[in-house]
Amino acid sequence: MDKESIYEFQKIDCNCNDCKFMIRNQDKKNKSLELHHKWQLDYFNVIKQKLIDKAVWWKKRKNDIEKWDLLMSDAESMKFVFDKSTAVISYGNCSKFNKPISFIPNICQIETQKCFKHRKDEISS
């Protein structure tokens, strides 16, 4: 899509992300990212610990050192990578209605069609 098509699509979409009344709340977004980071790290640690537990089971119960070694090397090679794409909700404040808002960018918001004004409309007029 070219710039003009994107602009027209955003005017139909009426997403707060493109509205001139939206003031971003980066603190709330950062707190959301921290929470998602914690959840993902906790999940990663659970998966890694289960792999270690399975390795120990193979060593103690089945006396299979090869299987234990393979599972332990898999567990040791695991690296945590945070996926920011899971924290898609953005936060801000609507200066028109003076209220906090949350939204997912690039998602159509039917409820904002009456109050939405594109941020680029202000620049061109």
Image: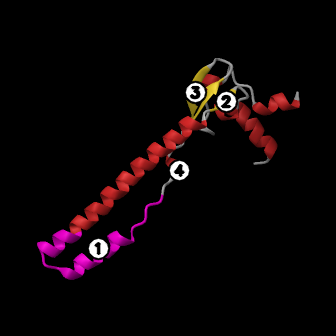
Amino acid tagged 1: Met
Q: Earlier in the sequence, mark 1 or mark 3?
A: 1
Q: Residue at x 22, y 65 (%)?
A: 53
Q: Which dot marks residue 23?
A: 2
Amino acid tagged 2: Ile
Amino acid tagged 3: Ile
Q: Residue at x 49, y 40 (%)?
A: 32
**Coordinates of residue 31 in the picture (x, y in percent):** 50, 39
**Element assignment for label 2:** strand
Q: Is residue 57 above or below residue 47?
A: below
Q: Which dot marks residue 72?
A: 1
Q: Which residue is mark 4?
A: 84
Q: Nearer the viewer, residue 35 or 89?
A: 35
Q: Earlier in the sequence, mark 4 or mark 3?
A: 4
Rounded to the nearest angstrom, the CA distance separating label 1 from label 2 is 49 Å
36 horizontally vs 48: left or right? right
Residue 79 on the magenta span: yes
State which mark lies toward you, 2 or 4.
2
Q: Which residue is mark 3?
A: 101
**Element assignment for label 4:** helix
Q: Residue furthest top?
A: 97
10 horizontally vs 29: left or right? right
Q: Earlier in the sequence, mark 2 or mark 4?
A: 2
In which quadrant of the rendered image does the C terminus lie? top right
